Amino acid sequence: MIAQSIDLITDESREIISRSQLFISLKSEVIAGILENAYEMEFKAGQLFIKEGDPLKGLCIILDGEASIEKINSVTGEAIELQTRSVGESLGEMTLIDQDTRSVSVRAKSDVKIAVINLEYMSSIFDEDPTTLATVAINIARILSNRLRESDEISASKMR
């Protein structure tokens, strides 16, 4: 990721992160720790800020703007937009589960501000507190389930 600027988390951003679907039902002290181990980055419209195949660098929450989720067509090499993510939505949550490289690219559709949350810190929380791990894993399962349903709808509409 190449940032236009890096800043500490603002109060407005703290609120967005705290309400993120990824962190529903977490204790306030856990969320406080997450916020202390996060920072903001900004990208201009059109800028690629997560590249498919890159190693893990952080979990992201969109704080402002929209981002396009893209997958490279293995035959043509062309980027295909799969979905759009907006304020409050997470990017890279699968990395908390599989710790693999990025499976998609993410491009700013408009000027975008994101919070980047340190993956090492998240792993340390999970090692110390299995309840937090279980809560986040269930939240990730819900997020991915919703995204799969959306993808199914998109696929079905294209078959008609």
Image: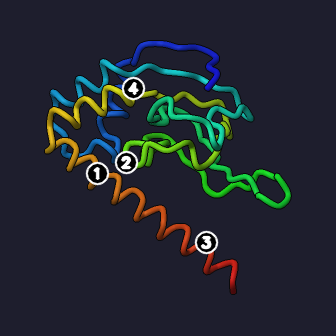
**Distance in Å between CA atoms under marks 4 and 2:** 14 Å
Mark nearest the camera among 4 and 2 is 2
Residue bearing the label numbered 3:
154
| Observer-nearest of 85 and 152 | 152
**Distance in Å between CA atoms under marks 1 and 2:** 8 Å
Residue bearing the label numbered 4:
118
Question: Dot 3: what SS?
Answer: helix
Mark nearest the camera among 3 and 4 is 4
- In the figure, is residue 9 to the left or right of 135? right
**Distance in Å between CA atoms under marks 3 and 1:** 26 Å
| Observer-nearest of 137 and 149 | 137
Residue bearing the label numbered 2:
97
Contact, mark 1 vs mark 2 (Cβ under 8 Å): yes
Residue 144 place in picture, x, y as percent: 42, 59
- In the figure, is residue 138 to the left or right of 86? left
Q: Residue at position x 53%, y 14% from top?
A: 6
**Distance in Å between CA atoms under marks 2 and 3:** 25 Å
Question: Dot 2: what SS?
Answer: helix
Q: How is the image coloured?
A: rainbow
Contact, mark 2 vs mark 3 (Cβ under 8 Å): no
Within-10-Å neighbours for mark 1: few <14, some 14–19, many 20+: some
Quadrant position of residue 154: bottom right
